[in-house]
Image (spheres, rainbow, N blue to C red):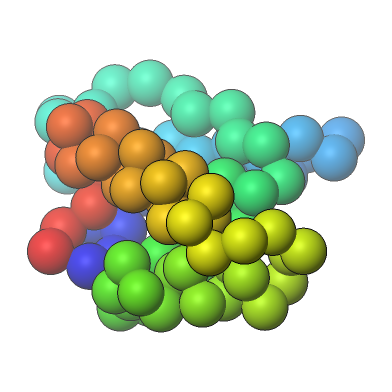
Amino acid sequence: MKLKNGIVTNSIDGESFAIATGEASKEFNGLIKNNPTAAFIFELLKTEQTEDSIVKAMTDKYDVDEATVRADVNELLNLLKSKNIIEE
């Protein structure tokens, strides 16, 4: 899975955002303000990823157990899927 074409991420004054542009804005019209963890996941999703690869990257970067990371990653991915922001 990865971000759909037209989903753009950026940081302004230390705040991370994602917005839909072009064709993607027909399905999602809004702005997502990301915390640092979500911003990291959005960066990963710029290339093809699996849930396992995201969990691995998160456990490598942060000092947290895999079960907690997997639950959080699953929650975010389900939200992004429901908003039609990622393609599988």
- Which residue is depicted at the point 29% across and 74% down? 50
Q: Position of residue 80 (x, y in %)?
A: 29, 40
**Residue 25 shown left or right of residue 32 in the figure:** left
Q: Position of residue 77 (x, y in %)?
A: 31, 47
Quadrant location of the C terminus in the rendered image: bottom left
- Front residue of 22/75: it is 75
- Which residue is depicted at the point 53% across and 64% down? 66
**Residue 23 shown left or right of residue 58 in the figure:** left
- Front residue of 64/48: it is 64
Residue 20 vertical position relative to residue 37 in the rendered view, above or below: above
**Residue 25 shown left or right of residue 65 in the figure:** left
Q: Position of residue 6 (x, y in %)?
A: 31, 52
Q: Quadrant of residue 81?
A: top left
Q: Position of residue 20 (x, y in %)?
A: 35, 38
Tag count in the figure? 0
Is residue 31 visible to us here?
yes
Quadrant location of the N terminus in the rendered image: bottom left
Residue 31 vertical position relative to residue 45 in the rendered view, above or below: above
Is residue 9 visible to us here?
no
Q: Quadrant of residue 43?
A: bottom right
- Which residue is depicted at the point 53% across and 50% down? 68
- Front residue of 4/88: it is 88
Which residue reaches farthest top?
30
- Which residue is depicted at the point 44% across and 36% down? 19
